[in-house]
Image (cartoon, grey):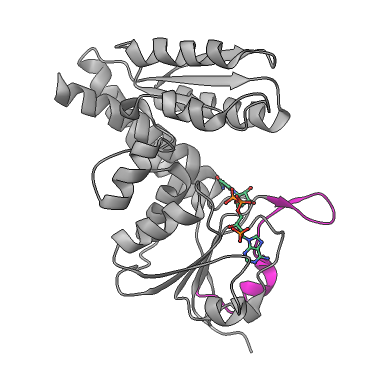
Amino acid sequence: MRGKMVQIIDGKAISAAIKDEVKCEVKALAQKGITVTLAVIQVGNNQASTVYVNNKKKACAYTGIRSLAYELPEETKQEELLSLIRDLNEREDVDGILVQLPLPVHMDEDEVIRAISPEKDVDGFHPESVGALCIGQPGFLPCTPAGIIELLKRSNIPIEGKECVVIGRSNIVGKPMAILLLRENGTVTVAHSRTADLKATAKRADILVVATGKAKMITRDYVKPGAAVIDVGMDRDENNRLCGDVDYEDVATTAGAITPVPGGVGPMTIAMLMKNCLESAQRKMKRT
Ligand code: NAP
């Protein structure tokens, strides 16, 4: 017999609502003569990066944010990229600077990220943004984990007091996710490849966030009945089709709520990027 129907968390609809809210506020700023601007830098022509960059430009066009595209050749020298970033840091009309990762192997990603002014760090990757997040001060939040908090809130899934387990500890997803859940008063466990008993750990979770990059690794025996399962993974299955880190069909039989792939976490990342650009322009207004 089937139990209660699983709640499918609709990242497409929620991200569309956020983009519409941003669009509205961008329009209000435009009426005051302020144009929100994002500079997007891509070095080389990694195919996946081109897709991501195009999606970001599309979201800018939709929300009314002006995007400035810098497409630099693969052989660009680190110093040239740093010099472009310094110019963009200085420009009054630029609110956000985004350098699409990964960079070509001859470049030092950490140095490039550090060169971006924290005031324009809309990806939230600068060490100052990460530090601010850790000690609870204002700063830009990394888009994917911030998007997951929005998904939970707008799906009426409470975080406070809940057992939250994050599988994965990367700097862009797992670690900031854990800190954000903690900020929302969850009780947080971070699991990873050296966790002794992953199934038992994951099964404690009321909210399980999976960011391992391992296609369909999480089956229902990792999931407490009724838990909310958030799948960050963007992987390929045996037929080369896009799938997540969670075995959706299997886990949906026991979870209380679940994000699909595609259409779950993915679209939230770009919506939160748009939100960060808007916030940057609003903060600039307050400073001046
Ligand atoms: P990552 O840097 O490769 O980190 C993966 C993490 O998972 C590591 O901490 C690793 O543990 C852990 N892990 C790997 N295999 C495991 C296993 N068998 N059991 C337990 N833990 C395991 O990946 P990431 O950048 O965080 O990305 C994770 C996934 O999210 C990828 O599929 C990526 O494409 C996707 N992603 C999606 C978005 C989006 O917008 N939707 C954004 C970013 C990433 P160790 O630290 O011990 O090695």
At x 31%, y 25%, the residue is: 26
- Residue 69 appears in the figure: yes
Looking at the figure, which quarter contains the N terminus?
bottom right
Residue furthest to the bottom in view is 1
Q: In which quarter of the image is ligand 1?
A: bottom right
Q: In this view, does 244 lie above or below 13?
A: below
Residue 28 located left or right of residue 218 = left
Residue 34 at what x, y percent from top left? 26, 15
Residue 244 located left or right of residue 78 = right
Q: In this view, does 153 lie above or below 275?
A: below
The region drawn magenta spans 235-256
Residue 210 at what x, y percent from top left? 56, 62
At x 53%, y 51%, the residue is: 265
At x 85%, y 53%, the residue is: 239
Along the viewing direction, whichever of 184 and 83 lies nearer the viewer: 83
Verify whether residue 83 appears in magenta.
Answer: no
Please tell me how many numbered marks the rendered image carries.
0
Based on the displayed image, in which of its 4 quarters is residue 118 positioned? top left
Looking at the figure, which quarter contains the C terminus?
top left
Along the viewing direction, whichever of 66 and 145 lies nearer the viewer: 145
Q: Is residue 269 above or below residue 156?
A: above
Residue 139 located left or right of residue 59 = left
- Residue 148 appears in the figure: no
Q: Magenta region, mostly helix, strand or loop?
A: loop
Verify whether residue 236 appears in magenta.
Answer: yes
Residue 121 at what x, y percent from top left? 38, 30
At x 53%, y 82%, the residue is: 225
Residue 84 at what x, y percent from top left? 48, 11
